[in-house]
Image (cartoon, rainbow, N blue to C red):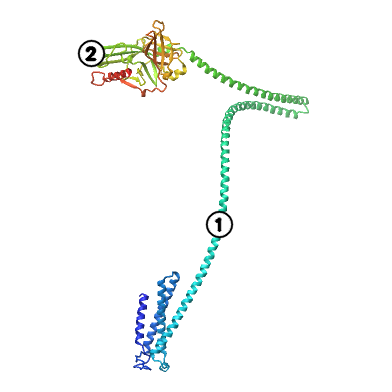
Amino acid sequence: MNRSILIVICDFLVSSMLCMMTGMAPGSTGVVGSRGGGAPGFGLDAATTLTLVNELHNREALLEQLRSRLAAAQKKTADPGRAELMDKVAGELATTRTRAAELERVLSAKRATTGELTPAQLKQQLQEEKLRYTTTQIRLDDARALLDDSESSRKRISGRLDELRGEYMAASRRLDQINTRLASTQKTLSEREYTLKSVGAELDKAKSELDLRERALAEARRISGAERNRAEGMERDISFLRGKLSVVERDLAESRDRIDVYKREATAREIERNEARRQLTDTKVMLKDAVGELSKVRGELVKTKVEITDVKVSAARSEEKLAAAREQLRFDIFERYAAAALKLNIEVIENGLIFDHKATTEFCLPLVELDGRPVVIGDFHMMAGDADTPLSFKQVKSLNYALRLPEGASAVTRIKEKMMLFADEPRMAALEAATVPDRKPLPTISREELLKRGVGDLFLFKSSSFGRESAQLDGRCSIDFANGGKYLFIRNGSRGGTELRAETGDSVVTKEGRFVGVVIGVESENMGRRQTARCYVVGDKFKWDDQLSIPLAKPMRQPYYDEFTSGVRRNLDRIAR
């Protein structure tokens, strides 16, 4: 049960009983008149009075326990409501103690000791005095407890204040030390920054010196490589000399053995011993001379090796120069052209209104190697078949490309796949001839290589014959540097000149046997009195994958070569532009 409710119940019971016992005394059984006109009252027996006293003591103990708990809680946290409750509990406790003391006095009182006062007056007086005494005692106890608490709190706060003062002084000292260290650190940081800048400058200087030393080290390593090779040669010589020295030492050991024999026979053979000594001396002298001769030979051997090395270097350089000279003096152009030449036969038949239109041409062209493929290269009109006979290229119903050897052999190679075009020069065309036997293709020289080589010692081969019409082009060739050297120009001279004229479709080859290009056009100057042929030269970055092509095959169930004719017309439009 809640103690507050229990206190209220006990208070109610005690109050009721006290009200009932007014004017009563233990042991009285009847109505007793009050002295001095007091009101009559009832009498209670001793057992009932003792029960009331016990109940009051129990209530006093409960109130004392409640007051102690409230005081402890008030020490922890001050609360105005709790202080008011403590006052109320203190008042209830004083009242309870007063009533208990009064009942104990009544229980032990005798009628002879009541004096002149009536029971009610005596009760009232005792209650007031007891109440004042109990209240004063309780308040004195509370004041003493509060005083003790205040003293302990003061001591505790004073100790804490001393601790805080000590912590403050220590913190002040630490702050001073931190400020001192901070100033020192800032000074040290400034010094280190200055030192860092100095070290950076020295590091840059050291890097420069390191680069110089690395270059010097590389040079020293190169020199040490030569010295190492020379040392290896000297070691081989020393090994050889050590072998000879071993032989001499072996001979010397044998001589010493003979000397021992001579010593054992010293008494009988003194003369032989002297001779042996002489021979030993001579041997030592010979050994010394041999060592000196060996040193001399070794020095001469080193010099000879150096001379041999120089001779080898000179010989290698001479060999290179000789190879270059041989390359310049080589003059096998006609043999190479003869081994690479092919005859190209082209037959084109167009459908006409009454009769078919047939164009048949034959050319002699060299087999050349360009971007890893063996091909024959010529002017586009030659390759299309209308170089000699005009064609409309509308309804071509027969198309035949054949390659054979120029000596008239019966073996024929048919070209049925495609005609390859040059992306940057529409007047050039080529046919791949990978299956032609017994031919050695000429290597191709690029325009960059031709610029380095020069335009001297070039030869012109006519496409109309197998080498019967050919001539050297000395003094007739030049390169247009303004256009990046894309064309080689050949001057034909005057109209009545005797020199072999360069015409469309002719091939130009160097004297070393490298293919230069094909003449793709002739320009007239001075009213036709002077002509200049234009020969196209490929670049060093030429790739067939970047070029164009025209199919030479006819689709199934188609009467005409429509893809061939449309491709030829497109390329003719490129030429016209």
Q: Quadrant of the N terminus?
A: bottom left
Q: Quadrant of residue 72?
A: bottom left
The label nearer to you, 2 versus 1, is: 1
Q: Nearer the viewer, residue 80 or 177?
A: 80
**Along the line of sight, the residue nearer the viewer: 233 or 77:** 77
Q: Tell me if residue 429 can be seen.
A: no
Q: To which residue does mark 1 refer? A: 174
Q: Is residue 479 left or right of residue 207?
A: left
How far is mark 2 from mark 1, CA to CA?
Answer: 117 Å
Residue 494's place in the image compared with 11, above or below, is above
- The residue where tag 2 is placed is 352
Within 10 angstroms of label 1, few (less than 14), some, or many (20 or more) residues?
few
Q: Amino acid at mark 1?
A: Arg
In the rendering, at what x and y percent does residue 572 appear?
31, 17
- The x, y position of residue 29, in whole percent, is 35, 93
Q: Is residue 314 above or below residue 17?
A: above
Q: Position of residue 53 (x, y in %)?
A: 39, 85
> Which numbered marker is on residue 399?
none
Q: Quadrant of residue 222?
A: top right
Quadrant location, the C terminus: top left
**Local secondary structure at mark 2:** loop
Which residue, as the protein is rendered here, is positioned at the far left?
A: 354
Above or below 535: residue 224: below
Judge left or right: residue 283 versus residue 517.
right
Residue at image x 57%, y 19%? Answer: 314
